[in-house]
Amino acid sequence: MGLLARCQELFSTSNLYDVLGIAKEATDAELRRSYYKVSLKIHPDRAPEDPRATDKFQVLGKLYSVLSDKEQRKVYDEQGVVDEESDMPRCWEEDWRLLFPKITVQDILEFEQKYKGSDEEHQDVIQLYVQHQGNMDIIMDSALCCSQEDEPRLRGIISDAIQAGEVTAFAAFTQESEKKKKARQNRFEKERQEAEEMQREMGLGEQEDSLAMILKQRQKSREQNFNGFLSDLEAKYSKKGGSSQKVRRGKK
């Protein structure tokens, strides 16, 4: 099965740019940053509950190799086809790690303090809202530095943008049922309890950030194949990256 068909199967779209959530005119820096952010969300260590996570990660790597190659990208842009004969790297895990070196838990915590409430977060949230047409399940899963407690704040950002006429009022957001909201809250609560249980099993101190320390411990024991949340914000720290992509808002 070809790359475009695999994208349709795994990501529900055959448009390579849509998989990454970027415009066709995206710069190399925007392409790299979006590839990083999407790959982290679907990384097998980050999404162990998804049986197709490994396939998604590998297909995303192939997608990136096409769009990051000027000649292949030009052919795709002009003809809508990709070179299916080109070989994928032997190990996308190693290739991905070469692009994005590791950062520390302290880096994450410091970034989170600066990111929450910033203009950058506002733009990211609105972009997710437009991209996923108001689906809060996906928005909450995709937003950076986000927990259950942040949902009212993110909903406020979106509601203000709708009221100001900046974006379309998608029914998935404005008419979301209480049942769906409750199901999402229950899922977050279950994940929180699982994280606390893992913390107790590992004997981690309460003064440490629970989730970060759990993932740090997992990194030590699974060094060869772990690239999870400890690297979740590298794209935003990268000095090589460009400015964030401007949101293309879906106005009525």
Image: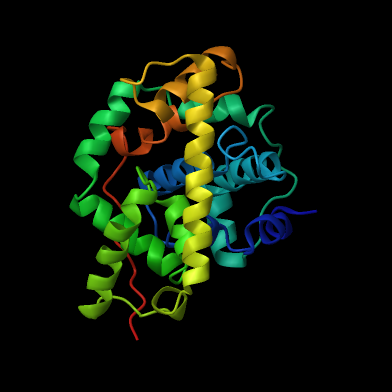
Q: Is residue 195 visible?
A: yes
Q: How many labels sit on residues? A: 0
Near-viewer residue (96 or 233): 233
Task: Please give the name of the residue rendered at 45% of the width and 20% of the height, measured from the top-left corner.
Answer: 216
Q: Is residue 228 visible?
A: no
Task: Please give the name of the residue rendered at 19% of the width and 54% of the height, measured from the top-left corner.
Answer: 119
The image position of residue 219, as x and y in percent, is 52, 19
Residue 185 vs 99, above or below: the answer is below
Is 30 on the left-hand or right-hand side of 7?
Answer: left
Residue 176 vs 29, above or below: the answer is below
Q: Quadrant of the C terminus?
A: bottom left
The residue at the far right in this view is 1
Residue 159 lies in quadrant:
bottom left
Coloration mode: rainbow
The image position of residue 7, as x and y in percent, is 66, 56
The image position of residue 5, as x and y in percent, is 73, 59
Is 112 on the left-hand or right-hand side of 172?
Answer: left
Task: Please give the name of the residue rendered at 40% of the width and 61% of the height, measured from the top-left corner.
Answer: 128
Task: Please give the name of the residue rendered at 32% of the width and 30% of the height, measured from the top-left corner.
Answer: 108
The residue at the far bottom in this view is 252
The image position of residue 214, as x and y in percent, is 47, 23
Residue 201 vs 35, above or below: the answer is above
Residue 154 lies in quadrant:
bottom left
Near-viewer residue (247 or 147): 147
Residue 165 vs 242, above or below: the answer is below
